[in-house]
Every structure is written in structure tokens, then in C-alpha cells.
């Protein structure tokens, strides 16, 4: 027996730490393939169905290899779980002295300099932000790690965080008076010395892109790289190999300049004026876009006269700020740094003003307060392939949802890793016994006015039968809000609607309140783990095809057409299949879980491509009758 086989045997590592552990062949198969990829410094792509135990299947061979390992995850939740739960468990069982480090993105660490900077400006904060500031200040005297994740009583989306954390733009780096105590620097040093580093995809690719430009090297050189939740990687990688220009950067620069004017540069009246003028123009620019967050084609948008005019005004006001700050250079380190930021923002502005480049997509997205303009390459395959070839490392890509109709091509092509070994490991759950798939008949088409009412009618008997243990997942905010309004007037269950509170708070309320029903969009389709009778029904409003207006999709589709291929089958279908698999994966999380999956989309049964979806989903009992689902749930909740 190899050490890996031994680890998964009845007397092995896992048997020591997991009560009732029984060896499972699919998990062992995956672990042996991972061991091989690490040994041979090759790439491996694995789809491991929910319940396979993929985390241990890659962690054990990685730890046994005694090489330097980076594990990158798609969500902070999984990052925390790996570092605080799974790895310590194995470490204890293996009696290893391997050093572990958890490394998050810069925005997760308290910046001592900025905390001090804003101590003098508390008068400008509203009551809620001030209350949060006081909590942060108190916590700052006790924390060892500076990780703002420790602040459980301050909301994740609190307005205080931009004031007390740094960005690449506003960090003073070696010029900072607190460089020796910097929490981010300490976390990085720890990661460089550690044997196993747990990061997330955004941090990994931010670092990879920085190396590409010859700057710092945040993630140390590794012998083994594991991407869990790897289905997210192609999009995240594209983002980091592109360019972005954001009103957030502008407003943060203005805020810091106004701060400096009030404190150390009170004699430079023009500084306050220039910053306030630019601040106002940036806010006006955001107001030209729809109130609700959206994405769109920047090439088309900049051709509209009112947008073009306001965008040009931004340049004028940016230039004015640049000229004023230039006159203050060398007065102090903070203003010198602001000058560098102004230069960098102007350079990004020029990139977004010239929309003629080929092989890239120009697109914008808005949040409630900001506009971000993006230039994104249509393919990262060449860059990524080169990176992997240079690395001399073993690369493992795994997720519960990478394969489409049993194949991996669409994933490996996007990353230029066509030579990677692939493995498909089925879930050990008995879906035929544990679950039922309902595709209701006679629903109005998606664009019809009566659609929301019809979805509410489907949901009501199922919510009643599941006693509120129900998720409704939507592909658009518009439909989410319409259905939420109808249900609010017609059922007694409390409704938890995404957008009304933070994600973690909604999930907490859902698990604590036995009757609550959760209504959400994209970010709840994955990475959510609710087990047992608390979640027995998941209703999905329609197949999650990306909006045809999505600018990245449009640009990639044009590119695929030029190659003589069909964008629907090459891009849209695989993306939608993976998104649907993620949504369906919320239902059965354990061997004892049972439940009903309702997909309110006829195309599953009456379009040829419906078969691709069905073949990619777990093998559930199927029905077109809502009554069958209701009876299944009633029966389940009586026991």
C-alpha cells in the first residue's frame, strides 16, 4: 500500500479523526490521481460530486508530499473552513510540524495608519458608521492578526471599512510609519515561511498579474497548487489580466486629499476645491447609469453624447487635481503617494477612453455607488499555459461542477491546459431515493407579465409542504422582487430577501428561523451549505443563461463566430449548465438529506439542449407534476 492508500484505509489517518469513517473508492481514486500529478508536476482536472470528500482527497496527498502547497478557494467561507477546521484535523492526525498560513486580500486587514488618519475626522461620519468606527477602534487594541473577519458585530458591508483598510492605490508601503507593525506585511511574511498557504482565487490571480508586471511577489513559489471551486477560475483570471478604471479609486483619492487639506496642508486652498470638484463629477457620472447594478458594453455607452461629455469632464477635473497635487509634492509622504495615485488613475482613464483595441472586451459594471470600467482579454489560455509550464509544480483543479455532459473541454480550453489529466468522480448520494426533480407544466414564458404570479403559485404549496425549508433562486433581481412582493401579501412565512441584509446575516436568520423562506440571486447559487430538514425544497426560476446583453459574452461570442464555431454551444450552454449544477447542489448536502428540486423552465424538456442539462445533473426521480413534489415534502416533514 502506498502512503496515500494507507491514509484512507480503515486504520489510516482519516479513521483516527473521523468517527464512523469508512473507506470510499471514489475518494481514494481522486487522492491517487492527485498524488500522481504532484509527483510528476503535471495538471489534473477533477469533478468530484457533492459528498465525495474532495477536500481530504487533495489535502492528504498534498501534506504527505511534504512540498510547499498553495490551496486557493473561491469563497472566504471555504478558506476559513480549510484553515480552521480541515487542515488542523489532519495535522493532528498526521502529527506533522508543517507550518500553515491563511492569507487574505489586502482589504481584509486593518490598516493602522488609516485608522489613525480618520481618528481626527470622525465628525464627518454618520451615526451608524461612527458606531462601527468605535467598535473597530476598541477591537484594534486587542487583535493579533488584524483580520477584520474577527469583527462579528460590525456588518460586512459597513461604510467604515474603506476608512480603516488600505487598497493597492492608497497603501504607503515602505514609506508608512507603521510598516513594522503592519498586519498585512506580517501575514505575507508568515505565508512565505509556511508549508501550506490557504488563499482565495482573487488573491492568487492578483498576485499572478502583479508578477506579470514585475512587481512584488505576494504568493510564494509553490510546488503544489490546488484550486478548489475551480469552475470560477477562467472568469477571475480574465479579470486580472485586464485593466480597470473605477469611480471608487477617484472618490477614495478625493477623500484622502480633503483629509490632508484639513490636517497637514491647510494652506493649499486649491487642494480642497479641486478634490471636491472631482468628487462631485465622479458622483454625477454614476448618476447617468441606472439605479440598479448592471453590466453593459462600454464601447456602446461612451458613444452616447451625455456619457461622453461627463467622461470628458472627469478627465478635466482629474487633470486639475493632478496639477494641484504636483505643486505639493515632497511636502509629506502622504501627498507624494496621492500624486502617484493621480498619475496611475489618469493612465487608466486613457486606456478606457480609447476603445479601438481588438481581442479584448470593453465593458462596465455598476454597484449602488460606483461605476467600474473594464478592459478584459477574451482569452487567458496562452498566458496561463505559459505560467503553468514555467512553474515546475503540480496543479490540481477541482470542483463539484466543472464537467458538461461528462466532458471537460470547455474548461481546459479556456485555461490552455488541454494536456491535463481528467477525472470524473460521482457523488456517493443516492439521488433517486433522496430527491425528486419537478419541471412544472404550463408556465407563462419568461417575458410575460403573468410570469411572477405563476412562479408564486408554484411556490406556495411547496413552501407550505416544506414548512418554510425552502430556497427560491432567481436569475434576475427584477423577478426576485416581483415574486417577493406577491408572496409577502399571500403567505405568513417570514421572507428573507437578498439585498435587505448581508449574506451571512440572511443565512443565519434562515437557519435560526424554522419558517423562513429565502429568496436570492446569483451569489446564493453556490458556496451555501444548509443541511438536514432546514432545506428540503429548492425552486429555480429559469435556466441560468447569461444575459445576451452581457458585454463579455458578446465579445467572446463574436470571437468564437470568427473561428467558425457556434457561440451558443461553445460558451452559453456550458456556462449555464455549470451555474445550474451549482444551484441544484444546494439541495442534497448529506447522505441523510432529502428534498425536491423544482426548475421552472420548459426548455429542459422541449429543447434538444435540455438533454445536455439533464445528463449533467444528478440522476433524480423526475415528474412534471407539482403535486408529486408537494406529497414528497409532506411525507418527509411528517417523519
Image (cartoon, rainbow, N blue to C red):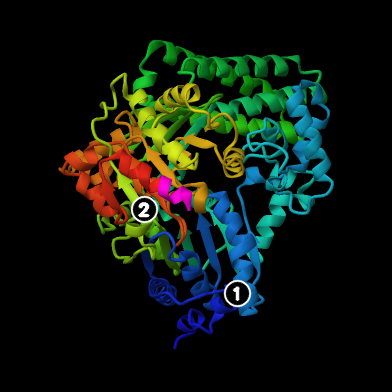
Task: Specify the label residue 17 is tagged with.
Answer: 1
Q: Quick check: 25 above or below 437?
A: below
Task: Give the magenta part as a residue range.
Answer: 634-639
Q: Position of residue 402 (x, y in %)?
A: 35, 55
In front of the other: 608 or 518: 518
In the foreground, 425 or 205: 425
Q: Residue at x 32, y 56 (%)?
A: 618
Residue appearing at x 42%, y 54% in the figure:
594
In the depicted structure, whether residue 84 falls above or below residue 572? below
Q: How many labels sit on residues?
A: 2
Q: Main secondary structure of the magenta part?
A: helix
Query: From the viewer's perspective, is residue 168 above or below residue 301?
Result: below
Q: Relative to the observer, which residue lies in front, 417 or 382? A: 417
- Mark with earlier residue (2, 1): 1
Q: Is residue 277 left or right of residue 230?
A: right
The residue tagged with tag 1: helix, strand or loop?
helix
* Residue 272 horizontal/vertical position (percent): 72, 17
Q: Which residue is mark 2?
A: 435
Q: Is residue 637 magenta?
A: yes
Q: Is 327 on the left-hand or right-hand side of 400?
A: right
Question: Badges 2 and 1: C-beta atoms under 8 Å apart?
Answer: no
Residue neighbourhood size for the residue with mark 2, other residues' Cα within 10 Å, grouped as few (<14), some (14–19), many (≥20)? many
* Quadrant housing the N terminus: bottom left
- Residue found 69% across the figure and 39% down from its top: 165
Q: Would you say residue 176 is visible in this rendering?
A: yes
590 vs 89, left or right, is left
Residue 331 is covered by the magenta coloring: no
Where in the figure is residue 487, as x and y percent of width and height? 46, 26
Amino acid at each position: 500500500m502506498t502512503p496515500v492508500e494507507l491514509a484512507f484505509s480503515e486504520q489510516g489517518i482519516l479513521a483516527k479523526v473521523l468517527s464512523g469513517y469508512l473507506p470510499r473508492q471514489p475518494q481514494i481514486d481522486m487522492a491517487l490521481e492527485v498524488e500522481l500529478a504532484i509527483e510528476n508536476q503535471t495538471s489534473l482536472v477533477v469533478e468530484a460530486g457533492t459528498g465525495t470528500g474532495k477536500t481530504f482527497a487533495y489535502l492528504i496527498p498534498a501534506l504527505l508530499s511534504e512540498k510547499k502547497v498553495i490551496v486557493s478557494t473561491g469563497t472566504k467561507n471555504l478558506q476559513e473552513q480549510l484553515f480552521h477546521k480541515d487542515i488542523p484535523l489532519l495535522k493532528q492526525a498526521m502529527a506533522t510540524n508543517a507550518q500553515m498560513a491563511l492569507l487574505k486580500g489586502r482589504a481584509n486587514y486593518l490598516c493602522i495608519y488609516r485608522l489613525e488618519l480618520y481618528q481626527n475626522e470622525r465628525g464627518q461620519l454618520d451615526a451608524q458608521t461612527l458606531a462601527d468606527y468605535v467598535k473597530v477602534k476598541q477591537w484594534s487594541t486587542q487583535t493579533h492578526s488584524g483580520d477584520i473577519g474577527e469583527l462579528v458585530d460590525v456588518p460586512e458591508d459597513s461604510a467604515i471599512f474603506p476608512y480603516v483598510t488600505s487598497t493597492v492605490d492608497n497603501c504607503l508601503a515602505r514609506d508608512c510609519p507603521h510598516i513594522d507593525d503592519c498586519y498585512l506585511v506580517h501575514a505575507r511574511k508568515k505565508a512565505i515561511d509556511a508549508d501550506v498557504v490557504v488563499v482565495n482565487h482573487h488573491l492568487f490571480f492578483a498576485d499572478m498579474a502583479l508578477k506579470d508586471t514585475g512587481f512584488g511577489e505576494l504568493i510564494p513559489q509553490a510546488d503544489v497548487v490546488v484550486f478548489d471551486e475551480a469552475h470560477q477560475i477562467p472568469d477571475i483570471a480574465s479579470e486580472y489580466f485586464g485593466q480597470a478604471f473605477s469611480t471608487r479609486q477617484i472618490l477614495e483619492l478625493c477623500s484622502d486629499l480633503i483629509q490632508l487639506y484639513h490636517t497637514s496642508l491647510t494652506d493649499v486652498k486649491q487642494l480642497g476645491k479641486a478634490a471636491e470638484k472631482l468628487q462631485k463629477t465622479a458622483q454625477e457620472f454614476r448618476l447617468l447609469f441606472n439605479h440598479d447594478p448592471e453590466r453593459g458594453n462600454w464601447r456602446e455607452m461612451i458613444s452616447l453624447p451625455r456619457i461622453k461629455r461627463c467622461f470628458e469632464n472627469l478627465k478635466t477635473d482629474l487633470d486639475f487635481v493632478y496639477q494641484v497635487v504636483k505643486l505639493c509634492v515632497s511636502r509629506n509622504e502622504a501627498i507624494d503617494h496621492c500624486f502617484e495615485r493621480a498619475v496611475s488613475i489618469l493612465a487608466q482613464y486613457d486606456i478606457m477612453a480609447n476603445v479601438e483595441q481588438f481581442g479584448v472586451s470593453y465593458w462596465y459594471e455598476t454597484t449602488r455607488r460606483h461605476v467600474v470600467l473594464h478592459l478584459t482579454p477574451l482569452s487567458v489560455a496562452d498566458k496561463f499555459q505559459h505560467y503553468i509550464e514555467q512553474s515546475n509544480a503540480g496543479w490540481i483543479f477541482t470542483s463539484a461542477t466543472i464537467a458538461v455532459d461528462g466532458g471537460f473541454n470547455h474548461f481546459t480550453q479556456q485555461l490552455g491546459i488541454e494536456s491535463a489529466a481528467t477525472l470524473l468522480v460521482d457523488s456517493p448520494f443516492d439521488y433517486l431515493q433522496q430527491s425528486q426533480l419537478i419541471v412544472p407544466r404550463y408556465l407563462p414564458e419568461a417575458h410575460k407579465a403573468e410570469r411572477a404570479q405563476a412562479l408564486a403559485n408554484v411556490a406556495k404549496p411547496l413552501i407550505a409542504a416544506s414548512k418554510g425549508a425552502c430556497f427560491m433562486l432567481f436569475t434576475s433581481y427584477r423577478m426576485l422582487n416581483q415574486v417577493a412582493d406577491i408572496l409577502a401579501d399571500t403567505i405568513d412565512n417570514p421572507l428573507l430577501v437578498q439585498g435587505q441584509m448581508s449574506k451571512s446575516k440572511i443565512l443565519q436568520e434562515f437557519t435560526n428561523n424554522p419558517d423562513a423562506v429565502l429568496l436570492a440571486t446569483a451569489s446564493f447559487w453556490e458556496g451555501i451549505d444548509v443541511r438536514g430538514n432546514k432545506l428540503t425544497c429548492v425552486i429555480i426560476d429559469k435556466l441560468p443563461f447569461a444575459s445576451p446583453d452581457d458585454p463579455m459574452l458578446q465579445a467572446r461570442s463574436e470571437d468564437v463566430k470568427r473561428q467558425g464555431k457556434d457561440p451558443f454551444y461553445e460558451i452559453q450552454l456550458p456556462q449555464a449548465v455549470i451555474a445550474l449544477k451549482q444551484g441544484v447542489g444546494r439541495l442534497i448536502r448529506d447522505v441523510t438529506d432529502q428534498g425536491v428540486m423544482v426548475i421552472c423552465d420548459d426548455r429542459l424538456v422541449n429543447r434538444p439542449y435540455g438533454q445536455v442539462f439533464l445528463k449533467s445533473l444528478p440522476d433524480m426521480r423526475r415528474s412534471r407534476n407539482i403535486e408529486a413534489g408537494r406529497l414528497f415534502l409532506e411525507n418527509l416533514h411528517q417523519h
